[in-house]
Amino acid sequence: MLKPVIKVENLSKRYRLGLKEKQAKTLAGQLGNIIKSPWDNFQRLRRLSRFGEEDQSVFWALKDVSFEVKEGEVLGIIGKNGAGKSTLLKILSQITEPTSGRVELHGRVASLLEVGTGFHPELTGRENIYMNGTILGMTRKEIDQKLEEIIDFSGVEKFIDTPVKFYSSGMKVRLGFSVAAHLEPEILIIDEVLAVGDYEFQQKCLGKMEDVSKNQGRTVLFVSHNMGAVKNLCNRVICLSGGQLTYNGDSKTTVELYLRGKPSGIESVHKRNFIQNRISEKEIYLRELSIESAVETGQQFKVKTNIFSTIKSSIQFSFTFKTLDLQPVFQIYSGHTGDNFQVKEGENQLSLEIPSLPLSQGDYKCNVWIGSNCQVYDFIEGEVLLSVKEGAIGENGPISTYNGYPVISKANWELI
């Protein structure tokens, strides 16, 4: 049985926020504040180190977070901005101390948390490689053996003897990742910095992380907003929200719960009325939308809408299906079959029916577009959530592609 190389128990981190000072509205009040300010400043300094009183200035970046990571495991860490991901990694990298709780680390840790982390700006790229290796406890001979491989992977060989302060952010990330991945740490911690690199280098990094974990048996902690990369690379994913661990499970399940906006557990996503009584100032807009509450692959699928118009106009309608990580699957667009609808002023009921839904089992987000050849009247992105159950695949499937994803052209439209 693999032993845990990272063990986190009831980890918490709190900060004291600076609060806006109250401003007096009168001249007399302002003069009083000036007189009292030395005493107020003294009291404020005394309070800075005391957290006993839970007032509005106390902010918990992490609160009672516990988990384990086993040897050779790739753990994904996801969550919205401000969820506590970076704070957690800084504690694991021993950059900052926790307020309470404990962390056990078994092995050397190499981390890439911010662009240029661990680099001395006045030293050259080559000198920084040796400095980082020394910090990790490696001998000069061990670093010499890896040096050419590190430089080649980073792709900055032309500038390797140039001070790092002259590097672009992308170059710093390239060299930083290459150093962190090749100096053989037992634990590799990577934050969202890979988003700075170009697509080709991102793919190289993902391949290297996979090699480090699977072939070399090292542990990787990977923070990213790229849900596709998280699902493909990570064995397990934890989700943070408001400094608390809300879900810990296999990558596919955790990512889908996070993308559905329900990271604390599985809930039914079958819902009939998604948009109701919507009000807008647009000339033509979607007021209501409902779909079938239970959908199966290959079965008939219906969408009913209420479109409100302040003008008489010819419109087209589009319904686009995407996976939860926003990859397009297919689109139903009335313009592909030359269907244009003459809407009247006031309410218009538009419905569409797909004789055989070609979607495989899973959850999808749907975009709704109303427009014409030269104008967009209304666009709603990702508010409709569709859950498809396994069923028999019918005869009518995708028959062409548009902008890289399959298109259903055969659909029955009706405007009332």
Image (tube, rainbow, N blue to C red):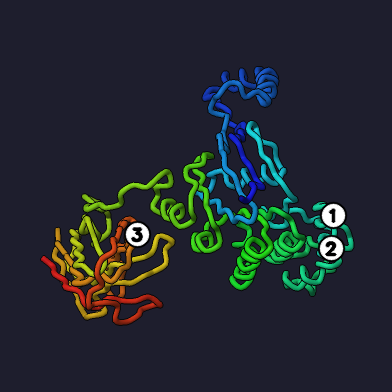
- Residue at 61% over, 18% down: 32
Q: Quadrant of the C terminus?
A: bottom left
In the rendered structure, which amino acid carries the disc numbered 1?
Thr
- Residue at 28% over, 61% down: 389
| Label 2 residue SS | helix
- Residue at 81% over, 64% down: 125
Please provide percent x and percent y for residue 207: 62, 68
| Label 3 residue SS | strand
Q: Viewed as shown, does residue 264 lie left or right of 213?
A: left
Please provide percent x and percent y for residue 285: 25, 60
Q: Residues within 10 Å of mark 2 (few under 14, many from 20)?
A: many
Let me know if residue 189 appears in the view. yes
Q: Which mark is residue 143?
A: 2
Viewer-proximal residue among 52 and 211? 211
What whole-number distance in Å separates the C-alpha atoms at marks 1 and 3? 48 Å
Q: Viewed as shown, does residue 176 lie left or right of 301?
A: right
Query: Residue farthest to the left?
Result: 416
Which residue has dot 3 on it?
Answer: 363
Which residue has dot 1 on it?
Answer: 134
Q: Residues within 10 Å of mark 3 (few under 14, many from 20)?
A: some
Q: Earlier in the sequence, mark 1 or mark 3?
A: 1
Q: Earlier in the sequence, mark 2 or mark 3?
A: 2
